[in-house]
Image (tube, grey):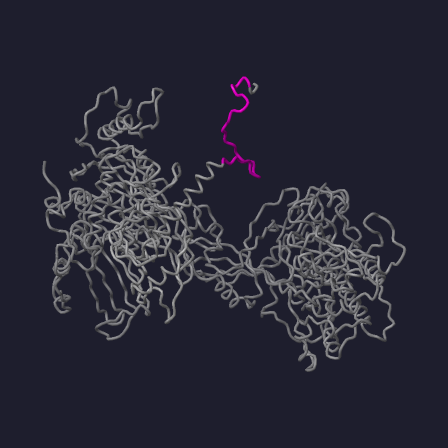
Amino acid sequence: GTIESSGLSDGMEVMFEYSLIGKDGALCWPREAAAKAGRARRLADEDNLFRLMLRGLNEHGSPSDDSIIGTTVDAMDFTGRWYPAEIVEVERNKRKVGLRNGSVAQVDRSESFEVDEDIEKSTERSGMVEIRRVKVDFGEIIGLEEWIDAESDRLAVAGRFTSDGIKSLESHDDSVAAADSKSQNGTVRKSGGSSNDSSVENGAVCPFPGYGGCGLVNLGNTCYMSVALQCLSYMPFIRAYLLSCLYKTTGDLNRENPLGTGGKILEELSELMRQMWSGKYGARSPTRFRALLAKTRSQFVGTEQQDAQELLNALIDSLHEDSNRIKSKPMVPPLDDAWVKKSDLERVGVEAWRRFLRRNRSIVTDTIMGQVLNRVLCPSCGHSSLNFDPFNMLSIPFPAVTDIVFRCTLVRRGTALNCPALFRNKNLNHPLKSTKSGSTRNEAIIEVYIINMPRLADVGDLKHRLEQRSGVASDRMRLWKAEKADVSHRVGRKIPIGASFVKILALSNKEGPCVQLVKQPEKEDATSIVMHDIYSFEDTLNIRVIPTSQESESNQSDELGSGDDDTVASEDGVQLQMSYRQRIQDDLLYYGDNLECFMVDTDPAFIARAVSRCLWPKNGSDFKLGLRVDAIDQRGHWFPGSVVEISDINGDGEVLTKHVELSRKVRLHFDNFSSKWDEWYDFNDFCNGQVTPLYSHSTPRIKPTEVIVYHRLGSTAKKASDVASGDLDAALFGQAFCIQFFNEWSTARAGAHILAQAARFLRSSKLAASPSSTARKLSKSDSTPGSDRLNDASDLASVAITDAINVLVESELNYIKRALSQGDADSNDDFDAAAMTSSLSEKLGSVLPRLPFDVRVCSVDSLLGKASGGDFEETSFPFSLVRTVGNYLNTRSAIVLHWRNVRLDKTGKKKSPRSLDVSVDCNDDALVAYMNPDTIMHPDESVHLKPEQSVDDTSEKSKSTLTMDIGVCLTEFCREQKLPLEDGWYCPKCKDFREGLQSMSLWLLPDILTLHVKRFNCSARWREKISTKINFPLTGLDMSQWCDKESSAYGNAGGHSTYDLIGVVNHLGGMTGGHYVAACKATPCSVDGSEELAHNFNGAGSNGFAVISPESMLDDQSVWRLPGLGKDKEGSTVIQQSRVAASACSRAVSQSSEPLWLHFDDDLVEPIPPKAVVSEMAYVLFYRRRELTPSNIARYSTLD
């Protein structure tokens, strides 16, 4: 439209409002912004005045004569929630306001208002002192008083964080549709969240009026409290006692008892239970009870998870002391030993209980407490000590086997002592100076030990036990778990019997209990003995200790760890000092001798450091392939690496011909990193300090490189290249093993180590002469037509492995000597790494084809030859002098020994034993020279094994479902056990401490029996949860068989000793965290405590509910169900419909033949079938006696 069309004309004034668009695109109206600023300013001024008032000052900053006691404020409690509170007391500073050490102190100007000098002077003249802190009373909401600093942010203006009209719990309960933005106690909560207690309370309707069914809101890890309160609310007598407030009419409330809470717990629990059983609510928030519990029981302060059993004990104890009818407890002397000895046991038990009641008379002692007889027998003099101890909860243990039986298979490293056939042509005449090996018996390769260990003993203790029995030092072994797998039939007939694939997985090397070594500790049966197989591999490195001269020894540590390269290098070249040179000579004296790789292994870290400095380039054309260096990355971190490529081509592919010394670049590959992190450097980087000699900035890795070696056999490969391409019908077999390498070894020296350790699995041609049973068994089975061929092939392989090791070790030594000679100023020896590598390849060309296997490297994800797309695909192991194994292998690498087949021709004649075939069309006569080493079984020390069990017991029966009857736990509770001497049982007859024999039995049974299943096993350092399922009866638990024979309950199979289940506390989770839920048998009870105490199985006979029409009842009255919540299309209220449905549910329950069991998960309440009550999560069980004590019925019930 136009201006004219809107009725505007020239000269008219128009007023309009505009908005500003911010950088974020949001509109900002100036009037709205001004209003917000005004509100913020008013709030700031209000806060400033409030802070002045708390300090005892008026609005001008002068001392005020008005008292602030009785002022209502908003205060934050210890949980971080805001509540309305009242100031009841103040505490002032001892010094005057404005005076500080005789000088005038400045008034705090951190507030947003200004205080002039006149205010300061008037404050000083008045002589008043400021208020330092105030005591606030949170009132009946949480029943807490607390001192809070006047300057604390936990105090605010009344109504700032809470509603203005705060209603009490009672008035709030009458309002069903209260606003869900604020809770009943005025605490601010976000609506719609799970933490909105008000919405939970107001939106939930009790599904079973008259049967409880009221959930409790979780206030922050309070599930342990919720389940305890729910189970207490279904205990007969206790429920009626609290609902009817009988403690008030009988005068049981004891406020003077110093052992109690002044009756607060009793009264608050009664009030909470009346709300839960009012039939109005589906959930309640126990805020007041939670605050009172934290105030009276300091161990439950905070939001940490607690033990439900400990809370139950605390609640029962508080109820007992708050309702104790003994106002003044007399001094009761103990029973006289002489009288006990000459009196009948029944008379002694009655007298002990009578003396206990002289100080303790309450509903807890009448209904929950029982009596046990504790006997301790002295093994020396036969004196028997008797004690009758009261209890309110029986902690029944599992008959747990304290030990775990491990079958430890120890695999020793291969040496010339346990592989004599392999090293028979090696002249071991050089004296063995010293090694770090802890092994004392080297003739065996595989040994099996049966070792018992306590479940919660340290893993290090298991290693020490294995060290004592095997002689292998505990720091030289690593624990592994093994899994056996079957080999395919096509491949399996080419390998010896018993050579199935054994896969190994490393166990955690961290400290922990032995129970963590089992296959599935969370499903471990702590009540029966099961054999657990673990493997222990001795470190394959036997570190040589080289004797050093006195001069080099004094400088050894300083020179190896020094970061100052000036001691070994200069700008003109590397000049070795005398001590440095002496250390090199000492190392070379033993490095590469006839013991190297066969008996001991030399750590080349010091030599590698010297080689790096001797080969340090003097110009750009002097780069050496394989040079070990330290290089700095973009983040300023130093890492060791190797030169893996030298290039005269820039990034664009252009060949550089000018100034080659400056333009030549090298590619560095960093240790233990993928090749994608390789970087290029030029000679300038070497000159400016970005690349330095090895270990001048970085630190040598102490931990050796470790990989797993697998055995593999192919059956349809046409050529050796098919192994890498994945075109291979292959299978893993045999015993996998781990192997370690020194990080500075070249791959040639590492290859020699692989061959030496693989020789342990080479078939021996002298089996018949071996004394072991395994050898004799195999020698009898070697009467096949190809056995001679296999023996000849084994001899050939033995010689080939020895020759290959000699070639590799000698070439390594020659390379090191030639490299170190470059450090001599007068040396004219030309160092040609390419020529030495070519010479090594030529020597290996005639040796490697004679090996019984092909050594290959692949990823751990491609063990069967399939390409993994990783850092490198499967390839032959590089026997190189210019690449270190620590730089070549990483944590994802694996070594595969691909065994070659030993074949016979069609006529059965031997083929020429010059070499082994690499499986060209493997026929049925093709075999391999692999054989498992002899296994030595050591004597069994598993003294805890039952007669029907043995070491080889791996049947499915021992792995069956982990269940146990509750009677087994009760029997374990009564079982006689020996008290350790450190427990300090003193025999009054012997006058000395003895290892007494203790036994316990039940003497007096209560009406309500509480059983605590001890699922948590603890030691000085470790803990575990026992997850064995306990089968407990829902009805008819006969306790007479666990009563003492002289007790009146023994042998009485009637209702006096028969119990029925009424509640269960379940614990979900483990030791690090969990959750509590409860299951309770719902029985009818009115809000005033009228309940039926006669025994029935289904709770039939309730008559306290309104009769509703059949039209509003459920279709099937014999089955109870939860009412559905929601709105119909007409928008009728949900609450009214839910109440009608809830009444129908209650009527259905009363007429059903099946008992109603309710599942409580905080505020969630739902029915469950009785068969779901028994589970492996059961933690605390509650039983009621079928025939309750008549005196309790007369005292705590009324007759209608």
Viewer-nearest residue: 273 or 1118: 273
Considering every residue shown, the one lying at the far right of the view is 657
Q: Position of residue 925 (x, y in %)?
A: 71, 45
> Residue at position x 28%, y 24% from top?
1114
Q: Is residue 1134 magenta?
A: no
Residue 18 within the magenta-colored segment of the rendering: yes
Q: Quadrant of residue 635?
A: bottom right
Residue at the image position 42 percent from the left and 54 percent from the top: 529
Image spot of residue 23 (x, y percent): 57, 39
Look at the image and tell me in which quarter the N terminus lies. Answer: top right
Residue at the far front: name it: 11
What stretch of residues is rendered in magenta? 4-29
Per the picture, the main secondary structure of the magenta-coloured stretch is: loop
Task: Residue 147: tell me if it is visible.
Answer: no
Q: Please state which of residues 921 and 167 is positioned toward the viewer in this rendering.
A: 167
x then y, percent, for residue 747: 73, 59
- Looking at the image, which residue sits at the far top? 5
* Residue 1038 versus residue 594 in the image, above or below: above
| Res 763 → quadrant | bottom right
Q: Position of residue 543 (x, y in %)?
A: 65, 69
Front residue of 865/790: it is 865
Relative to 282, say whether 420 is above or below. below
